[in-house]
Amino acid sequence: MRVVEKPVRIQDVAKAAGVSTATVSRALSNPALLSEGTRDAVLEAIRATGYRVNRAARSLRRQEARAVLVLVPNLGNPFFSEILAGLSAVMGEADYSVLITDTKGETHEDPALLDAFRDSRVDGMISLDGSMCVRDLRTLASRGGEGRIVFACEWVRDAHLPSVRSDNLEGARLAVRHLHDLGHRRIAHVTGPEDNVLTHMRRQGMLEERARLNLPTRDEWIIRGDFSLRSGAHAAARILEMRERPSAVFCASDQVAFGLISALQAGGVRVPEDLSVIGFDDIELSAYYVPALTTIRQDRRRLGESAARMLLDRLGASGPFAGGRAACDSEVVTLGVELVVRDSTCPPIVA
């Protein structure tokens, strides 16, 4: 005959520890309120009895989902992988599930998104997508999201929401400075999509450094892209048609740089001998591409980790574990970037 073991209850833990059930509950939810001796006794009783917390019931009592929503503008872009890995690791340690939504081709006015905070389906949101409009963000806030939204990597200007971002201005300056130090004076730039905040920041940094170094300018040397391989190939076609070609190109992303290099070499232009190329991001493929890509490195994993901690801080301030930061601030954390020199840049070769 099979014996079915009864699940261990919180009352069993309380009896084993010689405390009340309220004390056991306090040890699980806010152990800092207990003395060290009482806390240790409860933890030892939990180990001895094999007690497991019914997280679903606890979340229901507290009206928590123990889940956060992450908006990603394009899951097919390998840039986002390390950010997602970093934030998932931190959220997992805090016992939160991560729900990921690809917003590429989707409208932010989707009722399912705007109602994400209703009925405690999610407790917070991290957006890697800076294309949301201020109106939709206000709708989210009014439906339970106030103090529970954080931006990572990208952000929405004029939204005044907390965010974690890389120093895009300095990254662009580093890229232009590196090319200048190699001896390049004719430096082109392939941008990201026109309505993207990263595009504006990187273009601004490029223009500022180019002006500081008194480098020559030509309108055709700024080519619109969209962070994609295809836009890099399109930029290469533009460059191949120019009478006065640049000697170096700063690309707004590594993906753009890959597309550019491939199309340039197919057109008979050697990289870096005929034209140097530098990217931005330092995704994993950059070190293995041929030629290995010189680029600006963002610490993408740290971006994700920092954004997750920032959101957890706000959930603590507005939820049942009150005591964190004020929930409605516009804190900005800017992470440093670094130049990674590889094989796609070299001094200009004079024929």
Image (spheres, helix red, strand yellow):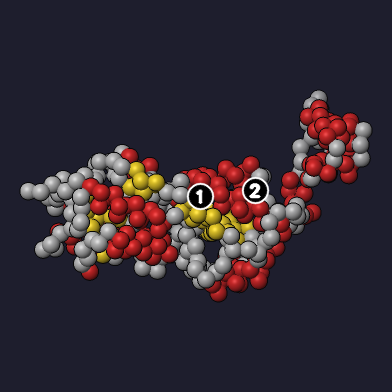
Question: Where does the image place residue 229, in percent across and percent down from the top left?
Answer: 30, 54
Residue located farthest toward the top when viewing the structure as drawn: 1
Q: Which residue occupies 35% across, 56% down?
A: 172
User: In which quarter of the view is residue 65 placed?
Assistant: bottom right
Q: Amino acid at mark 2?
A: Tyr
Q: Are marks 1 and 2 in contact (CB under 8 Å)?
A: no
State the CA–CA distance, disc 1 to disc 2. Answer: 18 Å
Tell me the mark number nearer the camera, choosing from 1 and 2: 1
Residue that mark 1 sits on: 303
Q: Is residue 268 above or below residue 19?
A: below
Is 20 situated left or right of 191 in this image? right
Is residue 266 in sight in this rendering? no
Q: Is residue 69 left or right of residue 33?
A: left
Q: Is residue 44 left or right of residue 140?
A: right
Can you give x and y, in whole percent of width and height, for residue 22 in the image?
88, 44
Q: Which residue is mark 2?
A: 96
Name the one closer to the observer, 156 or 171: 171
Q: Position of residue 16 (x, y in %)?
A: 89, 30
Q: Is residue 328 left or right of residue 76?
A: right
Q: Identify the residue shown where x is 40% and y is 58%.
A: 169
Is any part of residue 53 visible from this angle? Answer: yes
Give the farthest residue toward the left.
Answer: 351
Comparing 319 with 211, the one in front is: 211
- Name the residue: 36% across, 46% down: 339
Amino acid at circle 1: Leu
Secondary structure of residue under mark 2: loop
Q: Which mark is residue 323?
A: none
State the residue at coordinates (80%, 41%).
31
